[in-house]
Amino acid sequence: MAVKRFVHYYRLTKTYKQDFGRFCNLFSTKSDIESRQQFQKWHNGGGIFHQSACIDSTVLIEVGAIVHSKAVLGANVCIGSGTVVGPAVTIGQSTNIGNCIIGDSCIIHNGVCIGQDGFGFFVDEHGNMLKKPQLLNARIGNHVEIGANSCIDRGSWRDTVIGDHSKIDNLVQIGHNVAIGKSCMLCGQVGIAGSATIGDYVTLGGRVAVRDHVSIASKVRLAANSCVFKDITEPGDYGGFPAVPIHEWRRQVANQICSSKKRTS
């Protein structure tokens, strides 16, 4: 009723639009204040957390980090400065996360490391090995699951990105600047070198290796133990070392078997 009276009164004035905007902003501001009051300072590290989050007492949340509503953080988790943990995220024990933005409803299993420096070095004119700056972030989409003891490095020239609904198995290494699309599946011990780009709906079998700076198109599936040395531009199934279309790889395997049988006979 108060809103209706306000609208009726100010429709008679020339400043109706401006004043009604201010009125709406007033209610928005009150809502913002109420939501901010639900965030508190964490005792260990000085970061900010939502009062509905479930956080183990051993967790470290550094200043500049924020944990949103209904998040669950296990024992000995470390959330570094500059990290945002989205709503309803579950993080397993002994996980270390920094320089990272995590979307909604993600599951991060025990021992995962996200946001550490990537492996980047160069040799100067005097023959000294120098470290390249690794100053950007890792961005994890919504509904992503990351298996135990996997590592995702922060970016150097672009953010490292994991797309929405992607699923990552245990012991997976994702290098700096890697961009992975939505709904991808990475099986155990996959290794993706820096600056690789992977499309949507890509499946990498166990122990697949992807070289740095290559691109893999959407809807590609790679057989276990395959190695990608050059761009894959067409959807489909691939396998082998180096990876080729799956029918070519099967032909190579069949020819090898036939050749070995002839030699032994």
Image (cartoon, grey):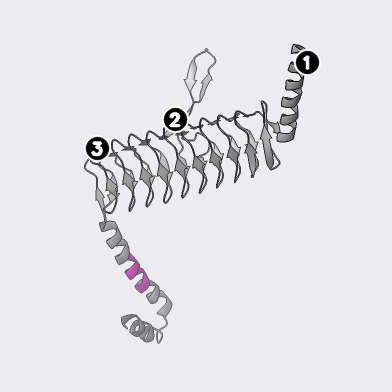
Question: Disc 3 on helix, strand or loop?
Answer: loop
Task: Say few, some or many: other residues with alpha carbon within 10 Å of mark 3 (under 14 / 14 to 19 / 20 or more).
Answer: some
Q: Which numbered mark, 3 or 1, is in the foreground of this view?
A: 1
Q: Find the distance from the CA under tag 3 to the CA under tag 1.
A: 64 Å
Tally the numbered discs: 3
Which callout, 3 or 2, points at the residue further toward the start of the chain?
3
Residue 262's disc is: 1
Q: Which image quarter: residue 95? A: top left
Q: Is residue 28 magenta?
A: yes
Q: Which image quarter: residue 60? A: top left
Viewer-side residue, 178 vs 200: 200
Viewer-side residue, 121 vs 44: 44
Q: Find the distance from the CA under tag 1 to the CA under tag 2.
A: 51 Å
Question: Disc 2 on helix, strand or loop?
Answer: loop
Task: Say few, some or many: other residues with alpha carbon within 10 Å of mark 2 (under 14 / 14 to 19 / 20 or more).
Answer: many
Q: For the magenta stretch, what is the residue range?
A: 23-29
- Looking at the image, the residue that sits furthest to the front is 265
Is 146 on the left-hand or right-hand side of 180?
Answer: left
Task: Provide the residue designation for mark 3.
Answer: 58
Q: Find the distance from the CA under tag 3 to the CA under tag 2.
A: 25 Å
What is the x, y in percent for residue 146? 45, 40
Residue 209's disc is: none
Task: Provide the residue designation for mark 2.
Answer: 117
Q: Residue at x 53, y 36 (%)?
A: 187
Q: Residue at x 63, y 35 (%)?
A: 222
Amino acid, disc 2: Asp
Q: Which numbered mark, 1 or 2, is in the foreground of this view?
A: 1
